[in-house]
Amino acid sequence: MDVKQISVFVENKPGRLAELAKVIRKNGINMRALSLAEAPEFGVVRIIVDDPYKLSEALKEEEYVFTVTAVLAAEVQDQAGSLVRILDILAEQNINLEYTYTFLAHKKDAAYMILRVNNNDAAVKALSSQGIRLLCQDDLNELLK
Amino acid sequence: MGNYYDSAKECASREQIKAWQDEHLAKTVKRVYENVDYYREKMQTAGIEPGDIRSTDDLHLLPFLTKEDLRNTYPYGMLAVPLSDCVRIHSTSGTTGRRVVACYTQNDVDLWEDCCARAIVAAGGSKEDIVQVCYGYGLFTGGLGLHGGSHKVGALTLPMSSGNTDRQLQFMCDLQSTFLCCTPSYAAFLAESINERGLKDKIKLRSGIFGAEAWSEEMRRDIEEQLGIRAFDIYGLTEISGPGVAFECEEQNGMHINEDHFIAEVINPETGETLPDGEKGELVFTSITKEAFPLLRYRTKDICVLSHEKCSCGRTFVKMTKPMGRSDDMMIVKGVNVFPSQIEAVLMNQGYPANYQIVITREKNSDKLELDVEMTKEMFSDALSEVSARETKLISALKSMLGIYVDVHLVSPKSIERSEGKAKRVIDKRKLY
């Protein structure tokens, strides 16, 4: 019950993110979500795409440094307190959240959160048992059709 | 005219100097042959006996000595006296792998301090001065060398050691220091701080000696103007004794080598052939009065030119130019010796690839060492904190290896410029020579 996130090392210089985006475009890959974490001189671009395998092949070809990480994609209702609910479940199980970012799909009244936690299995178990919907890669693609 | 610590030596006739050198060279060669196994074997391999070296004219027969020899004999293998006769050890800057230790007898320390005293007096210092020594005290020869020289001159000595600029400036103002000894980059930094804090009219400095790293004439003028002093250069290396092997006089045009203690030669670094006056080559020293650690034909790797032209200061000792470069890949950054191989070793230890580029710059007279390192899959992570933690670990490993802060930049793979398939490792943007 996870999706594959691709994290790419990018120098913090003008045009570097554009170069990466062009590689994605050139290969006809569609981006679902993107988040950028930046240090003073470099950044980590984290992306969720429709075809992670194709993207990793393309990045290998272009000699990028990157990693593929399994992260959770949780559906949250568009109402007050939804985020707290998820965070509380994780905290109760003593699961640490490394980072998170959100994206929207065509589905009304719902948003999606990418969760990078220190223990995926425990998080999947805890969230599912509390009725939180977690997407797998196929769900994700279905959702955005 | 007239600023001499020891005019009988410093202004001796060339004949007299040669006579001293001939006598002490022959004695030193005999002594090391008898007391140092390493030398004896080296000379036997070269087919030389002590009797073959009767004067400086025979000097060229002796094999060269390099830092490699000193490493091979680390720590006490070159000692020409019993260890119990030694009173002091100093060590070169740099690291475990590259360190060289030098031992001194009391007499060695005395003669070395005399050399530093000559430098101080030549720079206008006297017993009336208050000498602020802000070279590091410790294994580094800078602090204790100039400290001892200042004592010999009879000046009031302020053993500040390096760093703590606030305290340096406070004492400089409160105690009215008149003479400053430190690295040129620290002098420039002090000058800047003094001007920033509006302390210029509170200081009484009038002269200073600045060495242990390369500095340009432009930097000299900067320091002189900003501090309102005269700034003098000094040369030395731990292997030979420390600062004071050569020093500048009021002419500020080349450094007089203390030839009663050290014989200087300039050689072609490729062929080893001795070069005449005026020709650029590698400086080679033979110490002829050292008891504990006498070195014969030690290759300094510093490139310079010698001149026997008459100097207006009255000294007869040969003059050397400021070093104009190195015959190896050593860099001097912030007064510290740095070899690319050391940086390479740290990178490998920390799991980074040996694809790197060193960029050295000098801003506001202060050196900066930047290191571009190519990122790899192994060193990367989706968590920024992990990448940053590895970077911090690399910086502290470099600091403990080199003794200076290195400004690390993680760059994309294959982004470091390669010339003819081989990366250009060092880019020195400082205008040193």
Image (spheres, coloured by chain):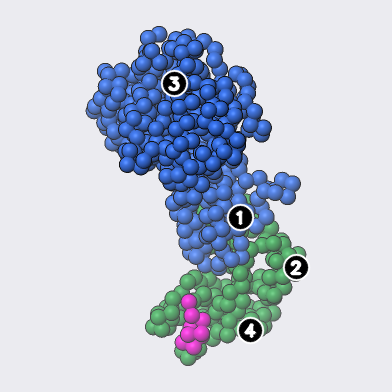
Chain colours: A green, B blue
Task: Establish whether labels 1 and 2 are both on one chain.
Answer: no
Residue B388 sits above or below residue B302 on the image = below
Tell me if residue B99 can be seen: no
Q: Closer to the N terminus: mark 3 or mark 1? A: 3
Quick check: A27 left or right of B93? Answer: right
Per the image, is A121 magenta? yes
Query: Would you name the residue on which mark 4 appears?
Result: A139
Q: Quadrant location of residue A48? A: bottom right
Q: Nearer the viewer, mark 3 or mark 1?
A: 3
Which sits in the foreground, B91 or B393?
Answer: B91
Residues indicated by labels 1 and 4 sit on the same polypeptide chain: no
Q: Which residue is at 63% across, 84% downward?
A: A139
Q: Is residue A141 magenta?
A: no
The answer to the question of whether label 3 and label 4 lie on touching residues, with beta carbons closer than 8 A, is: no
Tag 2's secondary structure? loop
Whether tag 1 and tag 4 are in contact, CB under 8 A, the answer is no
Q: Residues within 10 Å of mark 1 (few under 14, many from 20)?
A: some
Gap between marks 2 and 3 measured at Cα: 76 Å
Residue furthest out toward the bottom: A129
* Disc 2 target residue: A27
Can you tell which of label 2 and label 3 is closer to the viewer? 3
Q: Which amino acid type is shown beneath numbered disc 1? A: Ala
* Residue marked by disc 1: B354
